[in-house]
Image (spheres, rainbow, N blue to C red):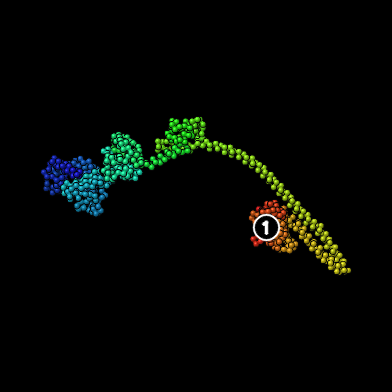
Amino acid sequence: MAIKKSKKSIKQGLTAKRKVSPGPKKTELANIGIRSSLANMSKGADRNVTKRKTAQKVLAEKHRLNELLLDSLPHLAMLIRKDRTVLAANRLARDAGAKVGGYCWRDFAKSDFIPEEDKKYIDEHKKAPPGGTCCYFCLADKALRSQEPARNPELDAWGKIWDTHWIPLDEQTYLHYAIDITEYKQTERALLFKTTILEAQSETSIDGILVVDREGKSILLNKRFGEMWSIPQQMLDTRDDKTMLQYVLGQLEEPNKFLGKVEYLYTHENEKSRDEIKFKDGKVFDRYSSPLIDSRGIYDGRIWYFRDITERKRKEKEYATIIQTALDGFWISDTNGRFVDVNDSICQILGYSREELLMKFVSDIEVTETNEEITEHIKKVIKGGYERFETKHRRKDGRIVDVEVSANYLDIVDRQFFVFVRDITERKRAEEDLIKYREQLEELVRARTEELTQANKQLLRNIEERKHLEREILDVSDREQQRVGRELHDSLGQQLTGIAFMTKALEQKLAAKSPDEAADLTQISKLVKEAMEQARDLAKGLHPVDLDAGGLVSSLEELAEATQKLFGIRCTFKCDRPIELENTEVTAHLYRMTQEAITNAIKHGKAKNIQMALAYGKDESTLTVKSDGLDFPKASRTKGRGMGLQIMGHRADIIGGSLDIHKAAGGGTIVICSFPNPNR
């Protein structure tokens, strides 16, 4: 209807203009006048100058009238011929590039919407194709064929949005005008987008939402609202707030109170409200209502939010029961420190009645902190949301109690503190007693440690004295062996040598007189020589001459040979590389330990084969004596060992080494002495 009205008004305007202008009774439009004038002018030179000037004047007047008519329109407007020649254009169109006498598509807005086939024709002929050319969205041909207005109500072109019209004036001419609706459409799209978001939010909300306009009609309600109130869908579809209101009243415990609140808010448009609604079946809803005020301050309706808080109320009731029966004290206070609620336990801890505490502030019972410190502490808890600390409170009777406080701050419930208080007086007393006991215990430990330190020092001195004594005993034993060895070598050896010479001389004297007696002397001389060799070997065993020069390797080689001769067993010695021991004391102890190991192997192990080995290592060297025969008895590891083994252990300890005696894998005994590498 709006389009037809526009066409009628434009035609009336054109008719009115034609009545004023001179001309034939039946004039087409300005464009027909232009075409007629141009046709008459083209007939030539045979027309007089007066007629030509008259025609030009008429044509100019018609152009002026057309432009005046179009300039009265507040939108882009042009009179266009079927071939897209612009007959007239208003100021807005001319500002956009339209030129009277030119093609609309060539000049107006420099259109890029021309079809490809028309572009090709224009490139080749530099003029409009037969039948004219147009942008692909142009509806002029459609309007001219049907002689009915054509419209594109939302055209995106040249970076804007247009409401475009093509109104036929006759079969050859049409009026084209375009209304810039960019801002309107952007606003409309933004509003639609916001509405879509609001509807999406309302549908995903856990709350029931109802929006009512000023006439009482529901303009928005979500699915959750219908579910919460159990309202039938056909009733929801009516959007009648009063009908729905009457339906839900039967579900409520106090319907009159509910209805009164609703009526009050509808008559007091600027007020907000929040309350609770109780149902007959035990449900509880939290109801919140707020007016809808636009940017101009005009009341447009009211929005209602409903949240099912049945479960929360049940938990709150349980919570209240737990708090009241809790052994710990509990209170709720505001940000000024005033008690809002207390339980029985805190009343017992502080000795006040509930009514008395509700008249007091936290500062009335606090002992440790001043009022300023309490204020700072409150700010600290508000900032952190929670704090746990110990302090002291004063009872009604003046007695001081130690307490442990756990404070929680919640700004969603009237900015309140939820505080648990535990009486820790007995615990603090026990802690103090424990501290005293710990101090006493530490003093006893210090005294006992001092005693043990002194005893340990004395023990170390005794050990050193014992080691010194053991060393002296071993030194005495070694010196005595050396003395005996020298006596055997120097005294007994010389005497046996003398006897051997005398026997030899006597043998020579009797050889001629008594051959039989001379033969006996020969046997005696042989026995004396053997005794001399045995005495010499014993002397070497008791005091090896090579030990004095540090020759451990040669001494052990001689010891192996002497063992084979004296005891008739197999005894070998192996050394992977020469080891030079400059310390004769170490050499002597190693040699004596080897002697003791061989003696034990022969005497107690009944050994037939003995293997001695001296090995040089990176950090320490080892002396090993391995023998067959009987196994090393396990009992000797736990029970008291013989004097020989103890002496071997003492010798190993003196040289800074260690002694290990254990059963060999194939039977027998292995004695290993490990001692520091002499060249480390």
Give residue 542's quadrant in the image: bottom right
- Residue nearest the viewer, comparing 329 with 562: 329
- Residue nearest the viewer, comparing 484 with 641: 641
Up the image or down, 250 lies above or below 549; here it is above
Q: Determine which residue is flagged by label 1.
A: 633
- Residue nearest the viewer, comparing 391 with 566: 391
Up the image or down, 108 lies above or below 567; here it is above
- Residue nearest the viewer, comparing 470 with 23: 470
| Residue 222 shows up from this direction | no
Badge 1 marks a residue whose secondary structure is: loop
Residue 66 in the figure: left or right of residue 347:
left
The picture places residue 422, in percent across and down from the top left corner, at 49, 37
Q: Which residue lies furthest to the left in this view?
A: 25
Question: Considering the image in quadrants, where does the N terminus appear?
Answer: top left
Identify residue type, mark 1: Pro
Give residue 440's quadrant in the image: top right
The picture places residue 218, in percent across and down from the top left corner, at 28, 41
Q: Residue furthest right?
A: 513
- Mark 1 crowdedness (10 Å alpha carbons): few <14, some 14-19, many ≥20: few
| Residue 477 shows up from this direction | yes
Residue at the image point whose x is 82% and y is 60% from the top = 496
Up the image or down, 70 lies above or below 566; here it is above
The picture places residue 369, in percent across and down from the top left corner, at 49, 32
Give residue 281's quadrant in the image: top left
Q: How many labels does the image show?
A: 1
The picture places residue 366, in percent across and down from the top left corner, at 48, 32
